[in-house]
Amino acid sequence: MADPSSYRPRPGEIPDSPGVYRFRDEHRRVIYVGKAKSLRQRLANYFQDLANLHPRTRTMVTTAASVEWTVVSTEVEALQLEYSWIKEYDPRFNVKYRDDKSYPYLAVTMNEEFPRVQVMRGHKKKGVRYFGPYGHAWAIRDTVDLLLRVFPVRTCSAGVFKNAARTGRPCLLGYIGKCSAPCVGRIAPEDHRELAEEFCDFMVGRTGTYLRRLEKQMMEAAEEMEYERAARLRDDIEALKKAMEKNAVVLADATDADLIAVAEDELEAAVQIFHVRGGRVRGQRGWVTDKVEEVTTSALVEHALQQLYGEETGDAVPKEVLVPALPEPVGPVQEWLTGRRGSNVSLRIPQRGDKKALMETVQRNAQQALALHKTKRASDLTTRSRALEEIAEALDLDSAPLRIECYDISHLQGDDVVASMVVFEDGLQRKSEYRRFQIKGFVGQDDVRSMHEVITRRFRRYLAEKEKTGEWTEGENALTDGDPLTGALKDDEGRPRKFAYPPQLVVVDGGQPQVAAARGALDELGIDDIAVCGLAKRLEEVWVPGEDDPVVLPRTSEGLYLLQRVRDEAHRFAITYQRTKRAKRFRSGPLDEVPGLGETRKQALIKHFGSVKKLRSATIEQIQQVRGIGRKTAETIAAALARAAPAAPAVNTATGEIIDDEEPDTTGGSSGEPVTAGLPDERRGQET
C-alpha cells in the first residue's frame, strides 16, 4: 500500500487550469482518469488526510504510485479527452457500465450494393443504419416479418445471396413475396436501395405520410375495380399498423428524446435509457456499474452520457435528453452533445406532464434492474468468494488468489506441441489475457520439459518488462525465435491487457512432475511469492510442490469446481490451438515451401498442369510457360518438388486396389481427419 505523500506533486507544480489527470499504480498501469475545471483544486482533494477520504477514494490513492496531468484549453476538451482515455486505458477505479454491447439492433446495411436488413450486436459500423436497441432479438424479427410484406428488402446472408445468384433461383422469401429477389435481377439496384430507404424512413417514425399514400392507392385501385391490388394494399396497411402498435405513443408526435434514469445504492448503480423517436418508444437498454469511486448521481449521469453518445453523431444524438440530475457543470456537457449532433441539444430535468410521467416509468425500470442484478450477483459473488477462500485454505495461502493462471500442454504424438495459458480474475474468465505458446526449445513429446519452458518464458518476460518499465506485453510474433526475451516492447502508457500483474496462483494441468517443473522454473527465476499447484485428471487430486501426497478437496467443494473450470478451459484453449496448427500442416504441400510463391501463382500452376504430380514431372521450360513464372522461380519450384517426397498412393480399402491416377491438389485441400470442422473462433488468444 503506497503513501500518497510519497508521490504528491510539490506546491506550485499543478496548474490552475482545466485538464485531465491520470493516477498510475506501481506497474505504470492507469487506474483512474478524471477531469477538472481546475487541476490544482481537484488534485489537492486527493492528498488530504486519508481519514477524511471516502473509503473507495482512499483505496484508489493508496493503490496509486504516481499522478500526471494534461492541460487543455476548455472544459469541453477535457470531457472529450477523459472519455477517450477511459475507453483506451479501461481504468479499474472508473465507473464502467457493463452489458452495453449485449443489446440487439435492427440494422440496414446501406453500405452494400443491395442493402440487407438484419439483427446486429456489438460495435456500430460505418454506413449501416441502426434502429433500437431492442430488449430481445425476437422483437426485431417480429417487426421485420410484418414490414417485409410492404418493404420486401433483402434479409439473406452474403453466402445465400451468392448461391441464389449462381443458380438463378431465389430463396423462399422471394417466392412468397417477402423479398424483392435482387439476387436474380427481379429489381434493379437503385430500386432496391429506394425500397431500403423507405424501410428506414418508416422505422424512424415517418409513418403518417406513407400510410396516407397507401390508403390513397387502395381507394384508386378500388375505383378502377382492381380489387386484388386493393386487397393487397389493404393488407399492407394492416401490417404496418400492427407493426406500429408494437410501439405505443408515449409523447407528442414527432418528439425525439432519450430519457435516462438512475437507481443506486452504496455499492452499485443501474442506468435505464428509453429511446423515443417520433413520439414512440423505439428502444430500451440498461447498464449496471460498480461504484468503485465516490460518485454522485450527477457524475453517474455524465458517465452515462459519455458512454451513450461518445461514438455517435448526427441524428443518433436526439434533440432532447431528459435526465434525473444535471451534470456539474452542465454547460460543457451540453456543448459537447451539441457538437456531436451538429445542432442544438436540450439537456434538462423534466418537471411536469407526459415527459415527467414517462421518466417515472424509466426510473421504475432502473430500480427493478438494480434489484434483479443484486439478486443474481449475490449468489455469484458468494459462490466465487467461497471458492477462492477454499482454495486459499487448502493450499495454505495468505490470501484468496484473485488472479489465477492455468497452463496446459497439447500435442498429437509429439507433433505440433503447443501450450495454453488462461486467466481467471475474481473467479471469472479474462479472455482478453489468454495466451498461447509454441514449444521451441526441443522436438518431441515431453510434457514436463514443455511446462518448464512455458513457465520460464512467461515469467522471464514478466521480469524483463518489470525491470524496464514495470509492464510487459506479448507481441504477435514475440518469443518465436532466438532468445525468449527478444520481442517488441511497447511503451509504458498503461493500456489494458498488457500482463502487468503476476498471478497469485499458477495452476498446471497434471500431477507431481508438471508441478515440480513449474515450481523449478519459478525458483530458477528467483520468484518465490507465487503459489503453484496441479490438478490431475484421474482422481481430480490437487498436487502442491514438495509434497508426496495430494490435497484432496471434497467433491462438493466450490474450490475444486473452480479449479476444474480453470483446468478445463486451459485444456480447451490448448487443444483448439493444436488442432488449428495440425489442420494447417495437413493443408500444406510442397509448393508452400517455395519462397515468394503466393496463392495466386500456386493456383495458376495447378490449373495449368492439373496436379502436383504432373507439375513434378514438368521441365523448367514448361513451368515457365505459366503466366507470372520466370526462370529463377521455375528453378526454385523444380528444386522444391524434387526435394519433397511424393505422396503415398491411395488404397481402396474395400478391394485393396491401389489408386494412383493423380495426386491430390495440395495447395488448398486437406488430408487426414477433418479436424477444423466446428472449431470455436479463438481470436482473443495471442500466440507467443
Image (cartoon, rainbow, N blue to C red):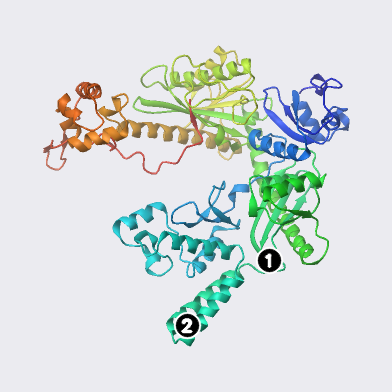
* Residue that appears at 61% across and 67% down: 206
* Kind of residue at badge 2: Ala
Q: Which residue matches tag 1?
A: 254
Q: Quadrant of residue 409?
A: top left
> Residue 70, position in %: x, y?
74, 29
Is residue 428 found left or right of 229 in the rendered image? right
- Give the class, few, some or many, for how many residues have Cα within 10 Å of label 1's Cα (few <14, many ≥20): some
> Residue 30, position in %: x, y?
69, 29
Q: Which residue matches tag 2?
A: 221
- Foreground residue, 436 or 549? 436
> Residue 8, position in %: x, y?
81, 22
Q: Answer above or below: position of 205 versus 462.
A: below
Q: Quadrant of residue 226?
A: bottom left
Is residue 514 found left or right of 649 in the rendered image? right
Disc with the residue nearer the chain's start (2 vs 1): 2
> Residue 259, position in %: x, y?
72, 57
* Kind of residue at badge 1: Ala
